[in-house]
Image: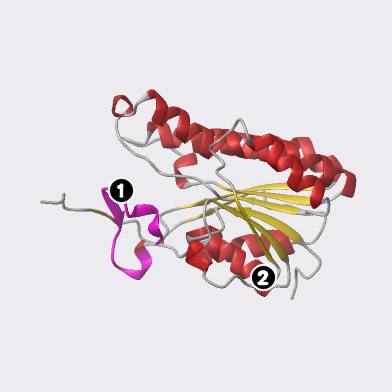
Amino acid sequence: MRLKKRKVLVTGASRGIGRAITEMLLQEGASVIGIARSFEQWGELPKRLLPLQLDLARLDELPEQIRQIAAQHPDIDGTVFNAGEGRFGSLEEFSPMQIRHLIALNLTSQILLARELLPNMRRQRRGDLIFIGSEAALHGSRKGALYCATKFALRGFAQSLREECSGSGIRSTIINPGMVRTGFFDKLSFEPGEAEENGILPQDIADAVLGVLSARPGTCFDEINLSPLKKVVIFKQPAQ
């Protein structure tokens, strides 16, 4: 129960990496505010989980919604910025609306969320901002221009907050996973190879988050890159 006194907000908490992180936090004794568009997949919700249904891509409404959460929970001392979406293709395959949506969800919503939560953390003189980035934040890739752009920008944002907030006792960390075995690939044309060492698990990222939150005060994991031992990509056969 290492996190018994912590209250952590997790975005994208209903499935995949976000759910694994949420379950780990609850097992370690933390209280969790989970944000997702739906929690139907959870079934019966566990104690100490407060589910909030929000669409983070609706930017006009988001700041006021987060202000209300911050006012009701001024003791939030950790945030895991996990919500995001993967879309891949040549740039000209994306409509202007699709471009705006991906940037809104993967980047702008994270910035707005941090902006509203930081004042309370500064008053507490402590807190953790943990961004779930991607290996796509480390190098560009063919058909990944838009997705990589959002993750590169998120990485720069996390690094800048690392410098900006350390004087207030606030730590900023970005975790960059490689290919993770989740529903992320359900609608994509590729997926990790079948061997165990071709993909990492959501629990692996949750373990990394636990390490960040449990680190001795005065230390900070600036960046964690977590990858499969052997990178193998399988391209799916198109539906007949």
* Residue sitting at the far left: 240
Above/below status of 101 relative to 125:
above
Q: Which residue is drawn at 39% across and 58% down?
A: 183
Front residue of 222 and 87 = 87
The range drawn in magenta is 181-197
Residue type of the residue flagged with mark 1: Leu
Q: Which residue is drawn at 78% across and 51% down?
A: 127
186 falls in the magenta region: yes
Q: Where residue 230 sits in the image (x, y, percent)?
A: 35, 60
**Disc on res. 87:** none
Front residue of 127 and 67 = 67
Task: Find numbered disc 1 in the image and state the secondary structure of the residue it sits on.
Answer: loop
Q: Where residue 125 sits in the image (x, y, percent)?
A: 88, 48
**Disc on res. 188:** 1
Q: Is residue 170 rendered to the left or right of residue 141?
A: right
Task: Find numbered disc 2 in the image and state the secondary structure of the residue it sits on.
Answer: helix
Q: Is residue 219 rendered to the left or right of residue 134?
A: right
Front residue of 180 and 37 = 37
Identify residue for label 2.
26
Residue type of the residue flagged with mark 2: Leu
